[in-house]
Amino acid sequence: MFLTLASVIVLASCDKTAPPWYQNSVFYHVYPRSFKDSNNDGIGDIRGVTEKLDYLKDLGVTVAWLSPIFKSPQIDHGYDVSDYYDVDPIYGTMEDLVELLGKARQMGIKIFLDLVPNHTSDQHYWFEMSVGRQLGYEDYYVWVDAKYSEDGTRLPPNKWISVFSNSSWTWNEKRQQYYLHQFDPKQPDLNLRNQKVVEELQRILAFYLDLGVGGFRIDAAPYLIEDSELRDEPLLPNLTDQENWFHLDHIYTKDTNETFEFVYRLRSFIDEYNKNHSGDDRILVTESYSSFDKTLLYYGNSAGTRLGAHFTFNFDFTYLNYNSTAVDVVHLIQKWVSALRGKYLYNWSLSNHDNHRSATLLGNIDGYNMLITFLPGVAAVYYGEEIGQENGEVDCLEGTDPKAVNNCSTFHLITRDYERTPFQWDATVNAGFNDGTKPWLPVSRKYKTTNLASQNVPGLRSHYNIYKSMIKLRKNIDDYCEVFVNNKSARKNVLEVIRTGRRKKGSYLFLFNMDRTKNKTMRIGKKRFKLLVSSTNSQYSNGYLFKNRSISLVPQESLVLKEIIP
């Protein structure tokens, strides 16, 4: 083999116990607005997802995770919930959701929902009751009295800034108090110190678990509970603007100890539900754009006595770019492995609805897609990633992202609309997203050359067929549980990963020449390898037998090989 003991890091080791169903699962992130529009109104919907379950099954998806579908004014595309117990009419009906759950279950696909516990819409009846100080709802949200300057001017309780800019506080004339909103003013923060609110949220979880949901992603987890003393946040070193969210050290509004405790309580609730109900375990995952030490606390406390999310999303790949190297990737993998090995679940993802598409950021996407599906743990794919779909083209007047549309001069810098354009099914009108009605975001101009229909051709070496082959391969290498990464090769800008554990049957090898201009040669000695999967730019055909002493890789070429044992 290529490796020496001095040049490897071990990602995993063999465990004789049966792994849980989710350990090597494939999470497919569906952004419902943009996936498939079944009724030709311009917006994707639940029936559209149901229509495409066969596609997800054929791809090899284990979990279809839906961004919020609950009833909402859609100020923030569903992350402003006005009724957790109903589906928003733009997506369909509760009956549509039940039908989706039933058909998905028949196909062996679990449906995950986004839960938004940090805030609701200001149109939720809880908020309306709280504004009126109705009995039992007085403290459902974070209400604080005003401060006053020496001249009598009313001021917010402190200088906290929302993620969407401007003050985190909005005055309510009827209640005569300020309410907190970590995001848009129309998204008031729930008071999660209130046991009644926690119990409400647990009832919501139980309602959808009873319907057959396989689990939940907790949105915006770091913002759940803020400092009770309402202390102003300090400026970061060498920064001066107290009104700029990015200039502040968010030690009082993000990743507080009470936030972690809340996540641990949700995990306990899920575990108790699993204990009392038959079937596969339901699981909880979290979204956390936090420092690495804080991110790890969403898995569980440092003492190991409290469990949190079954996994919290690893977003490190979203920070890579066109010029990233094999050393960068190895360091990224090594960081997570060193922290999680033998304790928590690995997961790997390249992009999502809040980050530019990986094909745009990284260029040739095959090597990265092959890597995250070759590594052990959860592989998360954002819709369209499997066909190499790139960012769409959206201008400010067409945009809908509430973070960006208020200032067209900075729209192109902060908008999330680029990565949310409709899935490119084929080369027909609107890329097959619907039957011709103008979509809520414009279809990318690239759809005629990048679409599923043109790639889903047997025998064609396409992004889609490569992704599908890799997911199929995962089922064959799950018990090849010792995984090695070669630091020495990385210094030559070649990513080299080996999965082994059953040596008498040979090992699996992944190679990715991340150099964009130079060929690379890798020694294999006297060993023989059969090529199983290769990138779209590869010079070799699948099935090719390597029996010489080296393998030559052209720039950006990636290969997955199986060792042949005589």
Image (cartoon, rainbow, N blue to C red):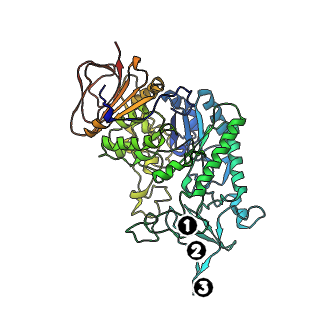
- Looking at the rendered structure, the kind of residue marked 1 is Ser
What whole-number distance in Å separates the C-alpha atoms at marks 3 and 1?
21 Å
Q: Quadrant of residue 424?
A: top left
The percent coordinates of residue 265 (x first, y second) are 65, 49
The percent coordinates of residue 258 (x first, y second) are 61, 57
Q: Is disc 2 placed on a helix, strand or loop?
A: loop
**Residue in front for this viewpoint, 532 or 409:** 532
Is 440 situated left or right of 85 in this image? left
What label sits on residue 509 in the rendered view? none
Is 146 situated left or right of 337 in this image? right
- Looking at the rendered structure, the kind of residue marked 2 is Pro
Pointer 1 or 2: first along the chain: 2
Any part of residue 143 in sight: yes
Contact check, label 1 and label 2, Cβ < 8 Å: yes
Tag 3 residue: 152
Q: Quadrant of the N terminus?
A: top left
**Residue in front for this viewpoint, 64 or 156:** 156
The percent coordinates of residue 435 (x first, y second) are 51, 39
What label sits on residue 168 in the rendered view? 1
What whole-number distance in Å separates the C-alpha atoms at marks 3 and 2?
13 Å
Tag 2 residue: 156
Circle 2 Cα neighbour tier, 10 Å, few/some/many (<14 / 14–19 / ≥20): many
The percent coordinates of residue 104 (x first, y second) are 60, 31
- Looking at the rendered structure, the kind of residue marked 3 is Gly
Q: Residue furthest top?
A: 566
Is 534 situated left or right of 178 in this image? left
